[in-house]
Amino acid sequence: MKKMNEYLIAGFGGQGILFAGKLLGNIGLIDNKEVTWFPSYGPAMRGGTCNCSVCISDSLIGSPVVDSPDVLIAMNGPSYDKFINAVKKGGKAFIDNSLVDSKYDGSDIDCFYIPATRLAAENDLKGMANIIVLGKVIKETGLATLETVKAALEVSVPAGKANLIELNMKAIEIGMAN
Amino acid sequence: MPNFTRPKSLVDVPNHYCPGCTHGIIHRIIAEVIDEMGIDGQTIGVCPVGCSVLAYNYFSCDMIQASHGRSPAVATGVKRAKPDRFVFTYQGDGDLAAIGTAEIIHAAARGENITAIFVNNTTYGMTGGQMAPTTLPGQKTQTTPFGRNTAVEGFPIRVCELMSQLDGVALAERVAVIDPKTIMGAKKAIRKAFEIQKNKQGFSIVEILSNCPTNWGMTPLESLERIKTEMMPYYPLGVYKEGSIR
Amino acid sequence: MERSLMKGNEALAEAAIRAGCKCYFGYPITPQNEIGAYMSNTLPKLGGVFVQAESEIGAINMIYGCAATGTRCMTSSSSPGMSLKTEGISYLVGADLPCVIVNIQRGGPGLGSIQPSQADYWQTTRALGHGDMRMPVFAPYSVQEMVDMTSKAFDIAEEFRTPVMVLADGLLGQMMEPVSFPDSGTTGSSSPTWATDGHDNKRKKNIVNSLFLEPIELENVIKERFDRYEKIKEKHCEAAYENTEDADIIIAAYGSTARITQTAAEMARAEGIKVGTFRPITVYPFPEKQLQAACKNAKKVLVVEMSMGQMVDDVKLALDCKIPVEFYGRSGGFVPGPQEVLEKIRGMM
C-alpha cells in the first residue's frame, strides 16, 4: 500500500492552527508529494475551537478529512481531550503542556510534551507556539530538513510579511531544541 | 410646418396596449429623447413583466426582457459590462415597488448609472387589475373588491419620496402624462435623466403617473381625470431629489 | 508546470479569471466566500467588475444582464443560495445566455448546515428552474479539476449558448491541494452576433428574451435547445473509471466522494475483493454509455454519495435495472470515511 501520513492539528482559533497546517502542506509540496489541507470552517474561525487535517502522500489522497491521525498536535485542553484517543496505534502526539494539564498514560502511542506557549512568550515569539511545536514534530519525525522548512515558509508566509520568515525559523529551532 | 411622425427609435409595428392607455405616450417620449440625443445605437433597454413585457418589440435599440422585478439588477449587469452605453429600465408599479423592491432600492443605493422609467397606474394591469403597492386607500381592485382598507392591506408606497432618501440617487422626479403640458414636463424629466446618465452622475428615476382605463372601468378621459383628482393629491408631482452624487 | 498549494475556492476563482471571466456578481454564503473575496481583490485590478449584489436573486439577474452583452461572467453560491437563483437560471436558459454558475454545496434542506454535502444533485440535474430545461454540470473531484473544469465550463457555455454549472462541495471548496494553471485556451469572443450591447446602427437590433406567446414558436425554440443538449451529450459527456474489467463490484461516486471510494476500493482490493470505480465527471449529461461499459462484467453496483441517495436514480436508469444497485450515503454534513465504505463492500459479498 502507498505511504501516507495524516496529521491533525487542533487548538483555539487564533493560535495559528491553520497556518501550521499550511506550512506542513507546503513542506510536503516541496518534497513533491501529494498534499491535502482541510480546515474546520465556519464559526470555529471566530475564536472557538479550530482544527485542520493535513495529508501527505506519495499518490492521490482519498479523503482529506483525518479522523485518526498518525500525528496529532494538541494546542489546548479541549483538543487534547477530543482527539488523543483517535491517534493511530504507533502514532505520535505533540502536546503543548503549557496549556494542557493532562498526561497520556497509555503506551500505544508516543507522546511528546513541549511548553510551546511559554517558550514563545519567553523568546519574544508571541503567537508562534504553533511553529515551536512544529519544530518539535520535525525533530521527532524527521519530516523535513531545515532548508525545506525555510523554502516552505517562503511560500506560506503572505507576501509583504517576509520579515516573519526569520522569526518562524527561530521558532522552529527552539522547537527542535526542546 | 413639420409633420407629426413616428420617432425613429420606435419600431413601426402596432402595439398591444389598450385603447386610451398612456404606455403609448410614454414609449413615444422616451423614443423622442433617444432620437434627439442620437443615442439609439448606444442604448439598451430592459423591460419588465407586466403590461409592458413586450416593449422589446417597440423600441429600436437593443432590448432585454427581464424577470419580474429584476430589471434594475439586469440593467446593473449590462451597465457594469458596458459602462459607456445608455441603459434604462421600464417598469410598472407591481414590478418596481412590490416584487422588485430590493433590486430597485439597491441599484439606486449603489448609484448605478442607469435610468428607471417607473410607470405608476396603481394596479396590476396585465393580470387583470389586482391591488398594487401603489393602489390608493379605498381603491377597488380585483383583490380589494370593497376598496383598499389600510387597516388590512396597509398603505401605498410613495416611490419618489422613498428614493430621494438614498445617496446614490441623482434624480427622483414624479411627472404625469395627462395633457400636453404634463407630457412636455415628463419628456423633459426623461431627457434630464438620460443627461445625468451621460455625465455619469448617478442613478435616475422618473415616476410617471399613468392610467388603466380597462381595469379602472373608466373611459380614457375619465381615467385621466382620476389621475388629476385622486392620484396627484396622494402622489404630488415634482422633483424630489436632483444633483450629481459624485 | 509549477504547482502551488491553493484552496479549491480560490483556485476556481483564479481559473475563471484566466478563462476570460470579466465580471463576477455574488452574495456571501459559507462555504464559498473565498470566491467572492478573491474576485473582489483581483478582478478590478485587471479592469474587470466585482459587484456584491443585494441578494442571490440580484446576483443572478446581474449575470443575466451582463451575459446579454456577450461578456464572460460568473456567479457562485452554496445550496440555499442556489434555490434563490433558480428563477434567474431558468431565464438564462430561456434566453440562451452563456455564463458559469458555481455551487459549493452544503447540507440542506432549509438552512441545513455549512458542512460538505451532495444533496443538491436532484436540484442541479433535474430542477434548476421551472420549465423544460437542462444545463450541463461538471463535478470536479480535486482542486486541480476545479481549475480545469471551470475553464472548460466557459467554453462550453459560449459554444452552446447555455449556463454551465460547476458542482462542488464544501470539502473541495475549503481544502488546499497542489494545483497548476495551464495556459488557458480561448477567453471568449469579444462581441457575439446575438449580444444586446448597443447596435451602433451597424446591425439590426438584438432582443434577449425568453417569452414566446405562440405555442409553436416556444416549442420550436425548446426543441432546438434540446438538440443542443444532444450535441453536448455526444461531445462533452465525461466519466473516469478504473479496474472495472475484472471487478465484481463497481463503486459509482462523483465529486469529493469519488476520492473516498477510490481509497475504499484500494483497501478492498488489498483484501482480495475485486472492486472497480466509476466516476461521472459530467453529472448532466449523465455518462450512461460509459457506466454501461464499466459495469459489463460487474455483479453489483454500489453508489456512494453525501446524501440520502440521489445520483443512484441515474445509475439505475442507465443500467436499466439489469444489475442490482445498492447505496451507501451520509447526510447532514458527514463525509463518509473509506473504512465505512469498505465495510459496506464487505457486506455486499
Image: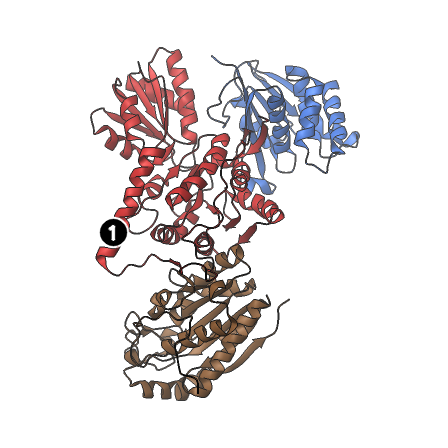
Chain colours: A blue, B brown, C red
* B217 lies left or right of A37: left
State which quarter of the image contains the C terminus of chain B. Answer: bottom right
Q: Position of residue C15 (x, y in %)?
A: 52, 38
Q: Position of residue A56 (x, y in %)?
A: 55, 21
State which quarter of the image contains the N terminus of chain B. Answer: bottom left
* Residue lying farthest to the right in this orientation: A123
Residue in the picture at 54% in, 46% down: C36
Q: Using the image, determine if residue C62 lies above or below residue C277.
A: below
Task: Write down the residue under mark 1.
Answer: C220
**Residue B152: quadrant of the picture:** bottom left
Q: Secondary structure at mark 1?
A: helix
**Residue A150: quadrant of the picture:** top right
Q: Position of residue A104 (x, y in %)?
A: 60, 20
Residue in the picture at 56% in, 62% down: B110
The residue nearer to you, when weighing B192 against A160, is B192
The residue nearer to you, when weighing B80 against B149, is B80
Residue in the picture at 40% in, 85% down: B178
How many numbered marks are there?
1
Residue in the picture at 42% in, 75% down: B7
**Residue C104 seen anywhere in this rendered image of the structure:** no
Q: Check disc 1: other Cα within 10 Å, few if <14, some if 14-19, many if 20+.
A: few
Name which residue type carries label 1: Asn
Q: Using the image, determine if residue A106 lies above or below residue C318.
A: above
**Residue C204: quadrant of the picture:** bottom left
